[in-house]
């Protein structure tokens, strides 16, 4: 199995996920500006998750870049990642509609953690298929972002019950770290 | 007609189906953990059907691998398969919301059986187009999973009325059989 | 502009349309078999429109087969076709939920007629771009199905107010004519 | 990163957006013609936004035509554009359901303005990546439509509070300007 169809299928699912999230922004009744008020937290949650799904799409592309042959474990590790990504619209909607309270914020972290673990498993499956001289293995060594993100999600889950604001800030921070290009840091780590 | 557009269209439909299922997981009112309780069976149904659609996507890809030219019967057999697959989100939602009771579990089996029959018809259409020295025909001989699955669905339909738990277990078992790699068995059958 | 992206975009829209229609099959409350009763006309409407969209996808592919360069008029004629196709889920849902009564059946015919006209316009745009020795122009001469279908829709619209059953039968008949391969007839017309 | 996957992903998102808008056309209760009455403004809003999204898809394709290598800023500028486009179904639905009143019309203009700005940023990112002899830079000089459109949106936002009809007319006018081929004007500007 070539990687083209795996990429196309993943792109399709991710494109649908990123668009389905906007359906949680339900058209309000009434045409005054203040009818949009209750939608603001839903909108902010949408922005955050849009960035996260965008990051996953970007990283997923780089991950598959060194891949040539799709094995059974890679195929299922990829579907496993898509499964957890598919839960992001649900947790985003729940978090937004409840204005970022404790349990929804914690569940958001749980799903983010599972996505990170699924991504790591996919990475392992690709490295296992590529064998000893895996191009990916060499690239992963300096992946401090990939290693730090799950720890941040892991910290944010209990933190949500103490201060959902701090937990959410942690999610925003992780997203920003991925967004901001950091050539200087990468050069040091090289 | 080349097979590229048939593959791309099928991938698109399957990617949308696998993602649409998650819309049955409706964001609950209230932000406490126990508001998620009623969603657990819906979630479990989603996991089961996600795996099934993933298996179909995977098998569909292998089925089309030996194909070069798309004939009219292949095209319509493929649309026929997509039609039955498109009913999976509905039956999954109905089964999940009713906590796996008799009729929804039986209907799930009916749709699964129709998907299996549609898959078999597509296989026949491809073998007919490839003629006597069909690559696919040789591969299908050892396809004990493909032959056993419809029998399992056929058994699960009446079983649902006696014990929906057993019927559901049968659906889970079939999914697991497809998931678990079975090189030893395949070698014996070679 | 190459035709690849036009094809991919059209495939995407058509794949989404064919899948969105199934969302009109709303999961009913209650788990007894008779709760599915009111869904039967919605289901039958879904089957009919699934076949129609499948036929359009198939014909669209053949239409673009002889195309090499996408001009502005072709691009907009294609979007115009996608627009009318995008209204099929709405009219299908309205017709199904009202159990095939007069006005919804007539509206179904109106949208079908507009789709046929949009398809014809796209055909004209492609022939205009290909000039005097258009491959498509030679193929279209024997397209009796393409010429008869709009007439059938045109007849079905007023017929809906007299007998919706007959109008619906006409829609089913047109779909069957497209589905059934008719090599004998085509050979006569050659 | 090649541009193929960026194009495919963008096409996927835009195809889903253009189709999701039709979901705001909710199947009405009752089968009489006058039950369609309240849907007319929603339908007109759908037509307008369908044309806008079609224009963006068309322009997006031309924008990427001169592109070979996708850099980080291009990738994120593209996702940023998709983000604002993804809000079009929401504002369209709100505008249509409220029969084109002041605030929804103004919000429609805000989202259109943000789309135009995001498009401009993507253009800048591509020109920056292509350097001094950018093919795109030469093409953009004569892009009077691209420069005039944001000004029209900017004017329509305050205009909405005075006369929503005029603001909407401005949106329609901008869409028409993009739709109508203007070879004479382009030749003058060459």
Image: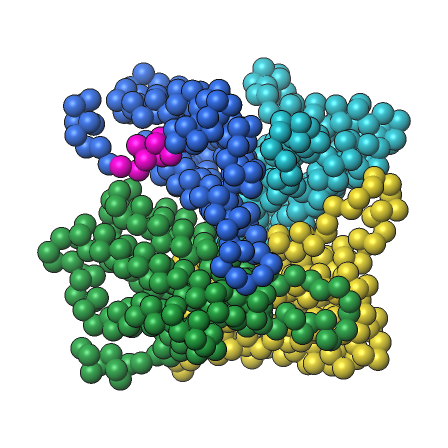
Chain colours: A cyan, B yellow, C green, D blue
Q: Visible in this render: residue A132?
A: no
- Residue placed most toward the observer, D52 or B34: D52
Describe residue D176's horizontal placement relative to residue A130 as left or right. left
Instruction: Specify the quadrant of the image occupied by residue C29.
Output: bottom right
Residue B126 rendering spot, x and y as whole percentages: 44, 74
* Residue C135 image point, x, y percent: 18, 61
A149 sits left or right of A72 in the view: right
Which residue sits at x=47%, y=74%?
A: C164
In the foreground, D106 or D115: D106
Q: Is residue B105 left or right of residue B37?
A: left
Which residue is painted at 43% across and 72% down in the image?
A: C160
Rendered residue at 51%/56% (across/down): D34
Q: Which residues are magenta?
A: D171-180
Q: Residue furthest left?
A: C132
Is residue B82 a member of the stretch shown in magenta?
no
Residue in the foreground of this view, choosing between C162 and D13: C162
B33 or A186: nearer the viewer: B33
Which residue is painted at 72% across and 51% down in the image? Answer: B25
Percent coordinates x, y for residue D102 in the rendering: 53, 28
Question: Is D2 situated above or below C128?
Answer: above
Specify the quadrant of the image occupied by residue A134. top right
* Whole-percent x, y for residue D17 in the image: 50, 43
Magenta stretch, main secondary structure class:
helix
The answer to whether one can see residue A103 in this image is: yes
Question: In the rendered view of the protein, which quadrant contains the C terminus of chain A?
Answer: top right
């Amino acid at each position: 199995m070539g990687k083209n169809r795996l990429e196309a299928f993943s792109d399709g699912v991710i494109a649908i996920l990123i668009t389905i999230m906007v359906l949680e922004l339900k058209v309000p009744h009434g045409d005054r500006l203040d009818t949009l008020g209750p939608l603001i937290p839903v909108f902010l949650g949408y922005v955050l998750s849009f960035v996260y799904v965008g990051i996953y799409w970007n990283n997923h592309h780089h991950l598959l870049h060194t891949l040539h042959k799709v094995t059974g474990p890679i195929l299922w590790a990829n579907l496993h990642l898509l499964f957890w990504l598919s839960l992001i619209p649900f947790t985003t909607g729940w978090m937004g509609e409840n204005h970022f309270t404790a349990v929804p914020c914690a569940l958001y972290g749980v799903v983010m953690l599972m996505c990170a673990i699924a991504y790591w498993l996919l990475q392992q499956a690709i490295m296992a298929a590529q064998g000893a001289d895996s191009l990916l293995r060499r690239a992963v060594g300096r992946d401090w972002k990939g290693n730090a993100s799950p720890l941040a999600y892991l910290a944010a889950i209990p933190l949500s019950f103490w201060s959902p604001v701090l937990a959410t800030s942690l999610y925003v921070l992780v997203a920003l770290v991925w967004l901001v290009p950091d050539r200087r840091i990468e050069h040091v780590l090289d």
